[in-house]
Image (cartoon, rainbow, N blue to C red):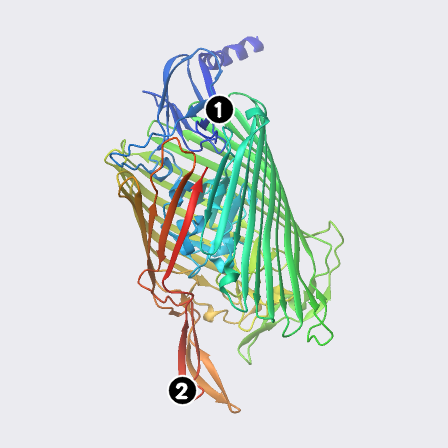
Amino acid sequence: MKKQLLLLFLLPILLQAQDKFSLSGSLKDQSNGETIFGANVFFEGTNIGAVTNEYGFFSLTAPQGEYTLVVSYMGYTDIKQTVSLNANQKLNLEMAPEASQLEEVVVVADETTKTNIKTPQMSTVQLKAETIKQMPVVLGEVDILKSIQMLPGVTNNGEGSSGFHVRGGASDQNLVLLDEAIIYNTSHLFGFFSVFNADAIKDMKLYKGGIPSQFGGRVSSVLDVRQKDGNSKEFKLTGGVGLVASRLAAEAPLFNGKGSFLLAGRGSYAHLFLNENKANFYDVNLKTNYEINENNRLYLSGYYGRDGMEFGSSFENDYGNLSGNLRWNHIFSERLFSNLSLIYSKYDYHFVFDDIGLDWVSDIDNYNLKYDLKWYMNDKIKFDFGASTIKYDFNPGEVTPTGEDSSVNYRKLDDKEALESAIYLGMEHKISPKFTAQYGMRYSHFIRQGPQSPNTYENDQPVVYNAEQGVYERGTPNGTKEYGSGDNIKTFGNFEPRLALSYQLDEKSSVKASYNRIAQYLHLISNTTSATPLDVWAPSGEFIDPQLGDQYAIGYFRNFANNAFSMEIEAYYKTIDNRLDYIDGADLIANNTIETEVLAGETRSYGLELLLKKNTGRLTGWLAYTLSKAEQRTPGGSAGGPGINNGDWYRTSYDRTHDLSLTASYQWNKKWSFGANFAFQTGRPITYPNGQFVYEGTSVATFSDRNADRLPAYHRLDLSATYRPNRKPNNRWKGEWVFGIYNVYNRHNAASISFGQNEDTGLNEASKTYIFGILPAISYNFKF
């Protein structure tokens, strides 16, 4: 009887399941075999649809019947195909790039520049390499990081820098991934170049908010950069020759078309233009893949980059990133897709300062094992779930004297080890034809491990307030704790909920809202506002808690004139707990007890972002504007005292009240195209002296509140022109000349302002330092 009741209860479900079938497959570029990420795949006349994932995979589930399958991706010819869905099926498709209508010179931006009205994903920008290559940049080199700085909510670290800040966050609060491997320093050649070679990159996606549950570890943003798989159709050669750097990339099929490879390299020769100084870089990208069968594919990708600098005979510096990723894609069924990754990443830095006889070396190694799955449950629900674990090995620094007359002694800072693990579950739910939700939960777990012998302090205070002198001082050590290999020094755990909602007002507009909480267990120990080779990363531990970020966002999104124009308006509010700031006179270099130099505070940032885009026609581009504020408050806490800035809110170094960017590309005719960038930002907050007094014959400056002043406003205009000579349609060699002018009107944007006394007059004076003014560039790019 019980079995009969159970069968009666399950019968409607079983019948419904039998009436529905799945259509799955992959989508590739017909010309080169690259998988296509973000294409729309749907059954015409229904609400049943999907978007291809990072590997081009899609899955649709629908009742039995005959449908017209439509595949759409801007820049490609649509696919329309009749499908009889009477059983589970696989269908691998290839899309043909649209033929250029040169007579009309009509330009269509890629699908990623169009506002997606239906999906709940917001605060997200996806750009293809082809779009980025249309933008003028410094020294004529295409640069992913400089392109995203032209978007709302994203600012730069200063002139010529590849670092970036998102919605008032610091650069160390951005998770930067290259084929899933963590990149700790994104810059080459003083920040003039980034580590991303555009010839090796397929696309990138920046999450400013509403971050999906599969990502964690950084509280501000995620920049997910994917390398090309390599051309699986024919041999291709791509490259370019510029004023200070050149590049070359080769790609070709392998294993009779079952695989492919990409090998790309860059190198600079900037040292040829320097006299006694030297500065150069090089990097190499590798990716290869092999299709075992229709359900299994292996990928191997890697990156290695190196910078070297010499200033006279007194200072040498080199640093670099190394990463590798072995991935296995497996399709369990028409609805279940998985990706298993084994990842290694390393960042090391080294400098020699001969004036004091100092040789310094430091590095970070991490090993990451992650398993991600996507389950297309039915036409309304899709799950993402998985787990990951990262093993960190920190070498904070090793100091070695360079000679007998060195003023330093050998010192090895304590190595640090940590283990960060996480599990996550996310679900996209089409509640109704107009209302879609994304739910997510992530649980992260962090263990600070031995071996180590950290200090203990009187009253458990690594920092104490000296009320008589009105300053913070290092706490008094009263012993050490001994931890062996594998012992747990400190353990943290955090639940990180995520939620995103989208309601479609009509076919052209929607409103969206999102919330995410993220825990960050690593801290960048630096007294500068941008990532430099001297930065030291430190894990959370007994005296340093993890950063916890909460962000809320709401927005209105609209497409106009058949998607030719689009508009996005977003408002956000973000708070971060346990953000470190440094006491006055902090000593951060070669310090084995960083906890004695910092106080924990909180930050808040909020703003309004506007993005207007023109997606089609001869003239394409966007206008971005951000009105925002970013502040920090750092009370004394257990150390006592008033805290930093008397415990009041003060501007962070990443606060920009106004940020305006204009990006435009114009296709004049078959031979000539033009590009322009204009950027304006409120000046960076800074602390100026506001007075002085004389003590025992020495003039001592006094200062205003922290970050109470600003540098002058930053603005510049860049222009570029691209010339493509006449060539026969069947000629495989395709070349183009790119002419560019960075900072057309020679604006001397202040990188810093220093104060001192004039040696002749004895009067106080301020001097401005800027990186460069107007800078022309020329490069030749080719494809074969």
* Residue carrying label 1: 377
Q: x, y (%) of residue 152? A: 36, 50
SS for callout 2: loop
Q: Quadrant of the N terminus?
A: top right
**Disc 2 crowd, CA 10 A, few/some/many (<14, 14-19, 20+):** few
Q: x, y (%) of residue 736? A: 38, 44
**Disc 1 crowd, CA 10 A, few/some/many (<14, 14-19, 20+):** some
Give the vertical position of 18 relative to 134 (above or below): above
Which residue is nearer to you in this view: 336 or 747?
747
Amino acid at pointer 1: Met
Q: x, y (%) of residue 252? A: 53, 33
One can see residue 123 in this view: no
Give the vertical position of 379 relative to 572 (above or below): above
Give the vertical position of 185 relative to 442 (above or below): below
Question: Is residue 200 left or right of 610 when viewed as pictured?
Answer: right
Q: CA distance from mark 2 to mark 1?
A: 75 Å
Which residue is nearer to you in this view: 526 or 618?
618
Question: Is residue 609 left or right of 213 when viewed as pictured?
Answer: left
Which residue is nearer to you in this view: 472 or 104?
104
Mark earlier in primary sequence (2, 1): 1
Amino acid at pointer 2: Leu
**Eye-nearest disc, 2 or 1:** 2
- Identity of the residue drawn at 40% across and 45% down: 133
Q: x, y (%) of residue 444? A: 58, 44
**Residue 763 image label:** 2
Which residue is nearer to you in this view: 693 or 188?
188
Give the vertical position of 213 relative to 689 (above or below): above
- Identity of the residue drawn at 72% across and 72% down: 403
SS for callout 1: loop
Q: Residue furthest bottom?
A: 697
